[in-house]
Image: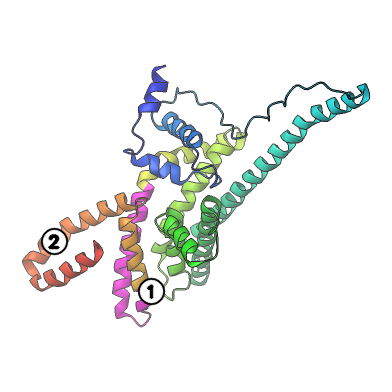
Amino acid sequence: MREEGGAASYDYDGDPRWSDYWSNVLIPPNTASRSEVVEHFKRKFYRRFIDPDLEVEAMTLTSSSQPDRGSGRSTSTPGTRNARTRTTASTPGTTASLRSNSNSFFLDKKTIHFSVNAWVLVVAVIGVLPLASRTLSNKACRLSLLGTALSSLYSLYILYGKPRAWNLLSVQAWFQSIIATKDFIRFVYCLTFVSSQIHFKFVLIPVLCWSLEHVAKFLRFNFNQSLFYRNYLENPCVWVEANTTTLSILSSNAEIALGFLLLLSLFSWQRNILQIFMYWQLLKLMYHAPATAGYHKSTWAKINRVISPYIRRHAHFFISPLSTVQRWWFR
């Protein structure tokens, strides 16, 4: 079929939406490297973004039953044969129950992740509302940051597990595998601001975007048959999924703006030099990490186009320090 050939020959690595889609797929780490699993989710991605008419078969990860042994001549009695038949007949039911238990446990993990993100979304909205008191807003900000940090750690554990051994080489290899992921970046982001003495409501904009995207995706894939979802939640969830790029751009703009706000905080009594250094290291990581590089590079390019002419005309003394900073940034 033409749709089958298009899905097989499509350049997934050249489509930035595929990396975002694959990074948000919640599957056990021992199955993420299997080729049939990757092909299955590629077909789902192709049906969702390219060809809605493409048929995607259900994925089965269980292996087939063991083949029968050599057909030797049996000397057992009829009663023994009947007992073996009953035992063999009961085996598929037992296998099915084990499969359902494992699937329900996997769904439970995704439900826990969704519940934390839904709670973060509600608390973050309370923190952003201008009608809330300053004390309530600050507490809501810290709780939403803490919830996002826990959610990110939980997602890292689901996707990457833990180090194979607690020695330096294993921990280093495990850390290198997660350092450029979205979940690790979000964890460090929340850790930077959760104990900060400076309270910017700007901090909650990326948190709102992340939790909103996750909640909408979970509701759309798990409650699309619900009457309440169809009446009240379907249109907002569809809008969120259709505007994930816009949310990512908004999040990257807020993250960069926070960096400049922290630089301005150097002139206040609440300044924290260590926090500013950590956050600008995080911005550098966001600039180079594949999951966030596209949005951050676009925003920094716009800033460079606006600021560079003014520096060349009116502030020549900034050219040399900026060159030093750029060498550190691109290193």
Residue 274 percent location from the top left of the image: 37, 77
Residue shown at 31% from the left, 52% from the top:
293
In the shown orientation, is residue 134 left or right of residue 271?
A: right
| Quadrant of the frame with the N terminus | top left
Q: Quadrant of residue 95?
A: top right
Q: Position of residue 258 (x, y in %)?
A: 34, 65
Q: Is residue 267 magenta?
A: yes
Of 299 and 24, which appears nearest the observer? 24
Q: Answer above or below: position of 195 versus 300.
A: below
Q: Nearer the viewer, residue 96 or 88?
A: 88
The amino acid sitting under disc 2 is Ser
Taking the spot 37% from the left edge, 70% from the top edge, the residue there is: 278
**Is residue 152 located in the magenta-colored stretch of the structure?**
no
- Amino acid, disc 1: Gln
> In the image, is residue 266 above or below residue 193?
below
210 over 196 or under it: above or below: above
Q: Which residue is mark 2?
A: 308
**What residue would you read off at disc 1?**
275
Residue 117 x %, y %: 54, 53
Q: Distance of mark 2 from mark 1, alpha carbons?
A: 27 Å
Task: Give the residues drawn in magenta, as a range.
Answer: 247-276
- Identify the element where label 2 is drawn: helix
